[in-house]
Image (spheres, grey):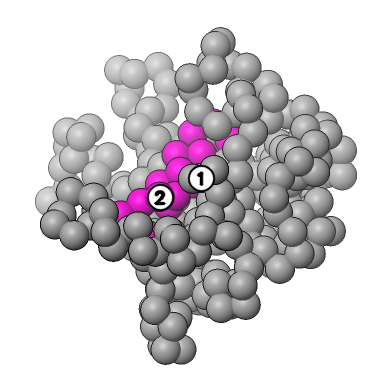
Amino acid sequence: MSDRKPAGQYLDAAIDLLRRVRAEEADGIEAAGTLLADTVEQGGRLFAFGAGHSSLAAQDVVYRAGGLALMNLLTVPGVVGVDVMPATLGSALERVDGLASAVLDSSPLREGDTLVIVSLSGRNAMPVEMAMNARALGVRTIGVTSVAYASETTSRHSSGTFLKDHCDIVLDSKIAVGDAELTLDTVPAPFAPASTVVTSALMQAMMAAAAGALADRGIEPPLLRSGNVDGGHDWNGRVLDQYRDRIFYQR
């Protein structure tokens, strides 16, 4: 029997989305994990980028217990979170042409690296331009997005394209346009977004696939441990020192 309360309905909706992702994106997740493992094995560096709330999923895989130490956050001032004032500035900056190019030009990204770009809609100038220019630099790209936006909305980039059109691998979060899972006759707007839950799960599944792929090749995955368990800081110190030339969040 279905839950008639909004909280239960929301959890059911999120679970259904996760089941869809597991069933429909399994091959893409494995391919993304393989690409990350290839990059690590070949001496490349790993980066993740997201704007606004999409940045939450990108940040979730950086300097994270149980995660790959080599994953770095590619930051753009003013668009990484909602701490900028006013909060609407971040959304405005995401639509500015040329900003992503300036960020890439001053970033440590280089040929042979891999960049994961998270954007729910994939329609704004920044993620599209980020993917286009990264690929031009010889950087491999993974896009985590909702493919539905490409058929139900228009691009805000001058090329008329979406993030998904410029990535080596695309992972579809299955989130409906508008990112709100629930409606009620007594509530005037759709509510209860699930994109962060699903996108974070996709990111962590990709990281798990990468760790497994490295282990299958006889390579110890450069994983971090929790600093709240005995020996965690010593373990992390060893990993961070071993890969210090590919880790940028310590500098």
Q: Which residues are magenta?
A: 51-68
**How far from the left and from the top, in percent, is residue 21?**
42, 62
As for residue 58 lying within the magenta part, the answer is yes
Q: Residues within 10 Å of mark 1 (few under 14, many from 20)?
A: some
User: Is 120 in front, or is 44?
Assistant: 44
25 w.r.t. 131: above or below: below
The CA span between labels 2 and 1 is: 8 Å
Q: Residue at x 32, y 48 (%)?
A: 14
Query: Can see residue 148?
Result: no
Q: Quadrant of residue 66?
A: bottom left
Q: Please report contact status of discs 2 and 1: CB closer than 8 Å, yes or no.
A: yes
Q: Quadrant of residue 67?
A: bottom left
Q: Quarter of the image containing the C terminus?
A: top right
Q: Inspect the image, locate mark 2, and give the three-letter code of the amino acid beneath it.
A: Tyr
**How far from the left and from the top, in percent, is residue 146?**
56, 50
Q: Which labelled disc corresponds to residue 111?
A: none
User: Residue farthest to the top?
Assistant: 86
Q: Inspect the image, locate mark 1, and give the three-letter code of the amino acid beneath it.
A: Tyr
Q: Is residue 31 left or right of residue 66?
A: right
Mark 2 or mark 1, whichever is nearer to me: 1
Residue receiving disc 1: 249
Secondary structure beneath dot 2 equals loop
Residue receiving disc 2: 63
